[in-house]
Structure formats: C-alpha cells, structure tokens
Amino acid sequence: MITADQLRTFTEQIFIAIGCSDTDARLAADVLVSADLRGVDSHGVARLPGYVRLYDAGRLNPKPHIKIVHETPSTAVVDGDRGLGLVVGPWAMQVAIEKARIAGTGWVAVRNSNHFGIAGYHALLATEYDMIGQAMTHAAPLVAPTFSLDKLLGTNPIAVAIPAATEPTFLADFASTAVAYGKLEILQRKGQDIPLGWAQNAEGQPTTDANAIRNGGALLPLGTDREHGSHKGYGLGAIVDIFSGVLSGANYGPWVPPFATAGFMQANEGVGEGTGHFFGPCALMPSDLPTSLKRIWIPGFSDSVRQKPLKANKS
Amino acid sequence: MITADQLRTFTEQIFIAIGCSDTDARLAADVLVSADLRGVDSHGVARLPGYVRLYDAGRLNPKPHIKIVHETPSTAVVDGDRGLGLVVGPWAMQVAIEKARIAGTGWVAVRNSNHFGIAGYHALLATEYDMIGQAMTHAAPLVAPTFSLDKLLGTNPIAVAIPAATEPTFLADFASTAVAYGKLEILQRKGQDIPLGWAQNAEGQPTTDANAIRNGGALLPLGTDREHGSHKGYGLGAIVDIFSGVLSGANYGPWVPPFATAGFMQANEGVGEGTGHFFGPCALMPSDLPTSLKRIWIPGFSDSVRQKPLKANKS
C-alpha cells in the first residue's frame, strides 16, 4: 500500500533529480498525483517516465524562464521556455486569473510548453477564486478527421470548471475523441479488442484492433462517424488546436510534438514553438444574481461529469 | 424560383406585421435568410411560422426594450425583454464586441430571449471586427443525458468563428447531440426510419423510429452511448446550458421554454426568465504574431466545418 503522500514525495524527488526547483517539483507532483486521486490513472504518476524521457531527449528545460510575450487587459500570450507543462500551465492560469480579477475575464494562450497533465487540474485552479475555469491543450496527432486517412489532430481535451456555491463544483474534462488514448492502451496491454467506433485501421475502416494506431490507423473524433456527428468532434478538436497552437505561436495539427510515449518519440520538423495550451477563466458574472448561482442545477449528473473538487480530495 | 431578396422582403414584412420595427424586421430576416443561403434549411425561413406562433401565444414582445442589467469591463448580462432572439442575439453580441475592443475579450450572457436562429450567424458577427466569435444557446429539453430516461437538456449548439486573414473564415457550428432535431424531422416527414444512435425510445433503448421523441423517447448526446463518449456530448450540452441559462438568470435544463414547433408548445412553470444565450468574442490576441495567423492551418477541412463567411454569400 502506497499512500498519496509517499507517491507525491517520490514524484517530487524525480523532478528534483532532473533539475527542477523544489517549488516546481512540488507543483508538478501535485498535478500528477491529483489525477490518480481522481481515478484518471492514465494521466497520473504513470506518465512520470514520459517526462523523464522528454528530459533525456533534450526537449525539457527543468529551469524555464516562463514569460508573458504579449498582453492586453484581458488577454496574454505566454512562452513556457520548454518547461514542464505541469508547471507552465498553472503559471499561465495564474496570469489569466489575475486578468479576470480586474477585467472580468482572461484569455491566455501558451506556446513552448509540453504535456500539462489533466486539463481539469488547471480549470479547477480558477474555482479557488470563485471563477469559472476553462483549460484546453492540443496533443500529438493520433486522430483522423472525418473522411481522413491521415492523423492530423490530437485528442485535444477541454475542461470547464464552474463553482456552484454550496453544491460540489461542476467539472467536465474530456478529450474531443470517442475515447482517450490511455483507455485504448489499457486494452492493448491486456491483449483485448477495442469496441467498434473508437478507431479506424490504415485503410480507414472500422476496427477492433487495439494496435491499429501503431499500424497506420487512427483514433476517431467524438461522434465516431459522419452519420453520428464525428464532424462535430472534429470541429471541437480543430477549435482546441487553433486556440492552443495557432493563437499562441506553438506548433499545430500534425506538427504538435509527441509526448514521450514509447513508439511516438520521433521529432517533427515543426511550424511553431513546442506544444500549446489555452486558458479562459471568468469571474462569475452576475453579481446581482446570487440566488441563481446558489440553485445551480446540474442535470442527472454522473461521476464522469461532476466530481468533488480537488481541494476536497487533497485534504 | 424565389430569389434570396424576395424571401428577405417577404420575411421582413411578416415581422413588420407582428409589430417589429423596420430595422428589427430587416435584421431578423437577414438571420433567417442567411441560414437558407448556407444550406441550413432547418434553421432558415422555414422557422418563420414558429416565431409567429410565439407572438400569437403572447410569448414574444415585438418592440423589446433590450438592456444591460449587469456589467464589468469585459462581461455583461443582457435582458432581452422577451424580444426576438434574432434581434436580441446581435444586440448582445455587439455589447460583447465593444467590450472586446477595449478589454481584449467580452463574455455576455443573455436572458429573457427566445430562439436566435443559427448560432453561426452570431459568431460570425465578431469576425467583421477581426475578432474570434463564440455563440451558444440552450434550447427546449429534447435530449436525455447519458443513462437518463428523462429529457433534461436541449440540443444546445455551439458556434466558433475564427478569422483567417487571406483564407476563408473558420466556422464550426454544431449541436451537442448526435444529430440536430431538424435532421430527424426531415426523415419524419418522409416517413423514413432514422439511423440507430440518434435517439432512444421511452424505455431508453436504441430506436430507428423517427417519431420516438414524440412518444416519450429522446435525442442522444454527441457520442450516442457511454462506450462512445456520450457523457462528453452530455457535458458539452450541460456547459452550454449553464453558460446560457444559469449565468444569465434565464431558465435552464428541463425548464427552458419550447420554441413554437408543433407538438412542443406546452408552457413550463419556469425557474428563470425566458431562453438564454451566451456570447464570447475575443480580439485576436497575438498582435506580435501576424505570420502565425496568416498561415492558419485548418486540418483536412470539410464543408460542414469550414465555409465561406456570410458576407461573401450576401454579396
């Protein structure tokens, strides 16, 4: 039995070993352990070797000089200086929150970062200031748009966290694909088939082969096929890519650098700087509507859509 | 053969006949005709009788006093005074654009409105100012969340329009369901079956019956079922509902008033004021990144995701 605290300390020490400051190592460990505590093991400490491989490949700066390169009263572009996404993300979200405190909203695009863990962690940071939080990131191309054979987009997740007074915080945090790649990997490791509708093979045909993505196939957008709205999942993934990659000056589409997962390490030529994210917090708007917010209503919620806030888990 | 101009004039005259000002009638007609010009017939002039029925039912104020009821430098809540959504929408988007011109972004929630036509029309308004435009609206409950038998959410669409310099404007505009209700109605009128995955029957089972919704069934969220990510489409629909309904003080969830479609006219008790929308434009952020914006890249675009801007169609 390993406790969360033991896991946190172990993870911190790994990050310190590759050169991160104590503060950054503590924050990065918190992001990863929080994923495990929420039951999203695919994005938790299991990803730690990936960050170390990024460092070994010279693609990670453990002591980044993160900075704002452009700003208006409610927007900013942040350069992550090739730092850990786990550290660059909260830094940029803090900028966005500061802007929202003054202007009401903040939109911050980030370039020159890498994998930032679960999007929900970053979105929830805003709720600690009683703000709505939005976080998104693009990712390496594993997804074929509707009617495409080529992998041109990542699983590009979106998270939206909304404070709800006396009710638990609303959090939706999901990939814009039928399934996250981590879910497919689990069946891959078990040697099991995947359900039809998650992926296509190299010929663009529906497949149950969990290894299809490694063999020229692709993940499918949310909606699976045209008849069931895959062009909508594709559109959602494209929006995330443009917000995270094009607005920030990071790479985009098929040029988003791979996270250091075995089998996806090859470097891309690049059309921008590193990986990008996007953050959009908003101070709760209707100060004259407290009752509306107190009786916030979440329709027939399920665990996957509404969970306890991180703070409750951490205590 | 009826030209767009003839259709526009006819539609204007109907709106004038129910008491709208010339200016409002012209704008409302433009929103509806633009849907037909984009090939979205389900949201075009075919909806005109619905607005007249709303008026006949005393639910539409043809001469609304639309006003801002709360604001910060980059946010506002607008009360539509039961005016046409086709008019309230552009009014509120103009407020959002003015805020974005000064602060960088604008988030505006609207209550006391009704059906606003295609979301894409409103999102595109921001692109005329070289801004990103976002528009969303909730709608009457026709959708069952994942694992639910009850219809608790609307088809709740989202539109995002992004200017792209010399390239055509990017526009994604889609319901958060497997299919829009209008698509199902088309097969209903033809007496044809619907594909499996669009709807469930009164027992929550998959159905090909195009009349299922009228008989206790429901539309399904984007993703269709849990295994293929319907909890994500459900989460997306819930986000749209909270932004449009809860932040604004409008109704929400099962209390969103029905649009005047035959068979869905019964009035609800109500937990807020009318129907809500949400608008979120952003002035293009990276003024130091003009090349990035010029080489904006849209992955393997299809007609449903990337279309010519309205202005090109109107000329």
Image: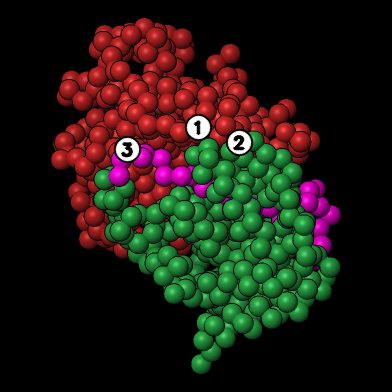
Chain colours: A green, B red
Instruction: Please provide the residue range marked out in magenta.
Output: A265-290
Amino acid beneath label 2: Pro
Instruction: Give the Cα separation between the discs numbered 2 and 3.
Output: 24 Å
In percent of the image, x 78 and y 51: which residue is there?
A273
Do callouts 2 and 1 mark residues in contact (Cβ within 8 Å)? yes
Looking at the picture, do discs 2 and 3 lie on one chain? yes
| Image-based side of B194 in relation to B314, left or right | left
Q: Is residue A125 left or right of residue B51?
A: right
| Residue B24 in the image, given as x and y percentages of width and height | 37, 13
Q: Tag 1: Cα neighbours inside 10 Å, few (<14), some, or many (≥20)?
A: many
- Residue that numbered label 2 is attached to: A73
Please report, as a chain letter, where disc 1 is located. B
* Quarter that holds the C terminus of chain B: top right
Identify the amino acid type marked 3: Asp
Judge by depth and name the residue closer to the eye, A204 or B9. Answer: B9
Indicate whether B119 appears above or below A309: above
Q: Which mark is residue B234?
A: none
Element on which disc 1 rests? loop
> Quadrant where the N terminus of chain B lies?
top left
Q: Which residue is mark 1?
A: B73
SS at mark 2? loop
Where, by quadrant of the figure, is residue B154 drawn?
Answer: top left
Q: Is B178 left, or right, of B249 in this rendering?
A: right
Observer-nearest of A207 and B89: B89
- Please give the name of the residue rendered at 67% of the width and 39% of the height, measured from the top-left corner: A71
Q: In the rendered view, tell whether residue A98 sits above or below residue B1.
A: below
- Disc assigned to residue A288: 3
